[in-house]
Image: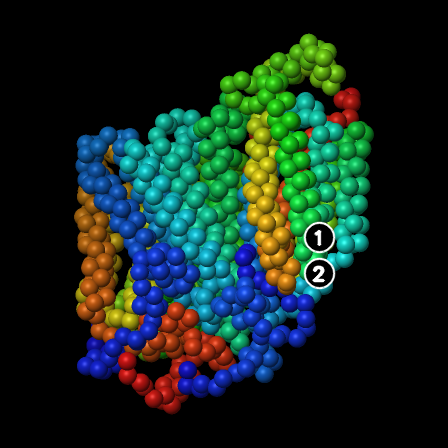
Amino acid sequence: MDNAIVDTHEVHEHVSLPQHRHHFETEEQQREAGSFGMWLFLLTEIMFFGGMFFAYLLYRNWYYDAFAAASNQLNVPMGAANTAILITSGFFMAIGVWAAEMRKRKMLVWMLVLTTVFGCAFIGVKYFEYKEKYKLHHIPGNNFSIAMFVSPQNYPQYPDTYAEKPLMPDMAQKTQVFFFLYFAMTGMHALHMIIGIGLLFWLTWRAWRGDFSSGYVAPIENFGLYWHFVDIVWLFLFPLLYLINRHPLN
Amino acid sequence: MAHEEIHSDVHTDAFDPSNVTNPEHAQHHIVTPMQYVLVYVTLLVGTAITVLAAYHDMGVWNPVVALFIACFKACVVVLFFMHAKYQSRLIKMTIGSGFFLFIVLITMTLLDYISRSWGMW
Amino acid sequence: MSAHTIVSLPDQSTAKLPKVNYINAEQGILSWLLTGDHKRIAMLYLISITFFFFIGGAFAGLIRFELLTPQSDLVAADTYNKFFTMHGIIMVFLFLVPSVPATIGNFLIPIMVGAKDLAFPKINLLSWYLYVAGGILTLAALVLGGVDTGWTFTTPLSTHYLNTHVLTAATAIFIAGFSSIFTGLNFIVTIHRMRAPGMTWFRMPLFVWSHYAASLLMVLGTPVLAIAIVLVALERIFGIGVFDPAKGGDPLLFQHLFWFYSHPAVYIMILPGMGVISEVISTFSRKRVFGYTAVAFSSVAIALFGFFVWAHHMFIMGVSNYSALVFSLLTMLVAVPSAIKIFNWAFTLQKGSITFETPMLYAFGFMGLFTIGGLTGVFLGSLGMDIHLTETYFIVAHFHFVMVGGMLMAFLAGVHFWWPKMTGRMYPESLSKLAAVTTFIGFNLTFLPQFILGYMGMPRRYAAYPPEYQVLNVLSTAGATVLGVGYMLPLLYLGWSLKYGAIAGNNPWQATGLEWQIQSPPLTENFTETPIIDYEAYDYEWLEKKTKDEVTTVG
């Protein structure tokens, strides 16, 4: 991940750039190897999240009513805004890669900063969402409460809840499974984002120093791959968690 | 080695006919910012459609539509933001194998659940 | 056994180790602990896995000691549970999974493809540190009081009914898993992108092919184990209910995720060993491997099919009959590529010039014992048989035949075969032959009775058993003692050879392969010149012609 040099010329001159690692014969080999390595790492991430996606698939089908009711507790505007924020962050990252390839140092730095800002915004929104869940006793564990699902009519102050059909207590208990999956999946996703934001700080500092604007693009490219992957995970999490059954129940 | 000739460039066709060390000169295509803007707008539009569709009752098609749009968005991100469209065949096969195995995990595990726990479904 | 040998050493009165090699290139402990040289990392791994092997072996000894008598009289049942759990965890995750890939693979893959190092040397080093961290955490779990879930961490026992150090052990395995992933990732990128000019896929040694297949499994399978462990940890810490039937969860879901990795894991363990056997059998029959393409493709086929059969570990756990049927059928399929290899090795031996140096003894042991282990695996894959044989000593015998009779013998074959290359020294041949025969005898005495025990119904993981099983258990323990001696011997004489062994020279076995064309021990950068390959693998005619033309230099 820390070694590869872009070669935008057709002719392969054996000019050694400082980041050339000598077990590689050419810079292009080094860069291709780095990119391939990052893609392989992303494959491990697909399989890692895969286990949780399966658990979701299973329990959503087993406890559909509970999942639908619990999903309606999530805030669609916040979720949709977060989706847009993350897509925007990815957009800036992509432009950043272009800036690095074009050797535009200042633009690259700006793009990395914007990527980071929007990434932090995403985490900020998630913080508020989690806080709300905490207040409503929807965090699985000892403090979990199914009151809002068994008797939604007691909560006129929450219009969305008020409009829901009440669930039988045993089905209402299963909302805890939904919320565990919600926290586990979005939490794991957020953890990956936080790691990414940490890396972004480091990359931004190095970009400002000019490390990536003289032909050595690989760390930006490969981080971009990681960042876009994290984005893709959210693109699936949003409809699966927030939009299970938003149309009026018949 | 018995022969100690010095080769100034061992990566030419004479010595490396199968082009092992430098296959498929990929990564020379640079995606333009305009392409990125198009992709960005597509993704936002897709998100909007997903949300709107969720509020319409399409019965069993709701999750299908939502997942279809999500897959489409993922493809767009992989192909353009992640440059997969312009990468070597190796990278494309790598991505494919990842998704293939993900599908194997999901479907073969589902094979078990779908043929028991009849009352739960 | 024939007195004929193909060993060809330089004149010992004048031979010396090469002046500069990867071992003396840099001095000081930090130059080892911060190295990027794949060969040094391989040596670091060799030392650490040997350490953990003997700890795991000690637990095996304790298990067999307890099983001498029908009563649970040596230790309480709970403690016995900790014995077999620690034995399993250490042997599977800290020994078998990294054994050949991280030591011999790390050392040889770059050399075999003609590269100067692996693609990502720093990640290689990180992989070793992660391994050590996982190992230390496992020892911590041990010292703090042990884990008694079995190495399979089956839910809901591991999540709800135990208060032993499950979390510590689970974290240890999580970290060790990343070590495995990074090793596999490194190999895949190296094999795809760093082969020397002329080194096409079908000119690579079969050792590389089997490591490639194992690396695919490492990269794609291990993350699923990771998520399974994470979910167990979340269940234990927060009581989320994912595996808790009372909260709507399904304990079987854990098993699906766990075995999705752990079945391919057995192929991660055996495939590199099969690669070693290909090299050893070819060298000591002086013949190219029969059906190179078939063996190469069978490695990849094992990797692919290995992903489709995991639920055969769950036949009695509550999976549906239909799903069990499908997995049983698929399990029959996965035996085919392994059988192809055995046939091809047998045909390699046919009409070859066979000599019986130590690596070849281990290889013969492998062929016989792995065949028995593999065939019993087919019995177990058959649904009707498995209902009766599962969770008995039949299973224990089966996997020890493939893993110890198979993989461990292959590992020892590889260590002996490449010892002269890695260290520049030969080991003492007569002592090593003795050790090989001792392990073979000890192994059979230990594990053959266990097939009978299992068939007669003795359950596994039980500290106490009905008295009618005692005779076979005593036989098994006696065998284990012999086996232990057989494993101690290499530790002693290999250590001895480092200082007093004969100087090996470049190619003591007169083997083909790039690694035998360079000095022993190799230079840090492996090759002085990028090699150019214009000959096929296992080309003994090319080697003979080359040796005739070559002037042998001294030292």
- Same chain, marks 2 and 1? yes
Q: Amino acid at mark 1?
A: Met
Depth check, front residue: B106 or C14: C14
What residue appears at the point 64 percent right and 32 percent down from the top-left corner?
Answer: A124
Assess whether mark 1 and mark 2 are in contact (beta carbons under 8 angstroms).
yes
> In the visual, does A148 lie left or right of C518?
right
Q: Amino acid at mark 2?
A: Met
**What numbered label is drawn on residue C115?**
none
**What numbered label is drawn on residue A102?**
2
Depth check, front residue: C328 or B82: B82
Counting residues from the N terminus, which is met first, the one under dot 2 or under dot 1?
Answer: 2
| Circle 2 chain | A
Q: Quadrant of the C terminus of chain C?
A: bottom left
Q: Residue B16: x, y in percent?
A: 57, 78
For residue C237, say whether it is visible. yes
**What numbered label is drawn on residue A107?**
1
For residue C391, say whether it is visible. no
> What separation in Å lies between label 2 and label 1 (alpha carbons)?
10 Å
Q: Residue C317: x, y in percent?
A: 46, 35
What residue appears at the point 19 percent right and 81 percent down from the top-left corner?
Answer: C13
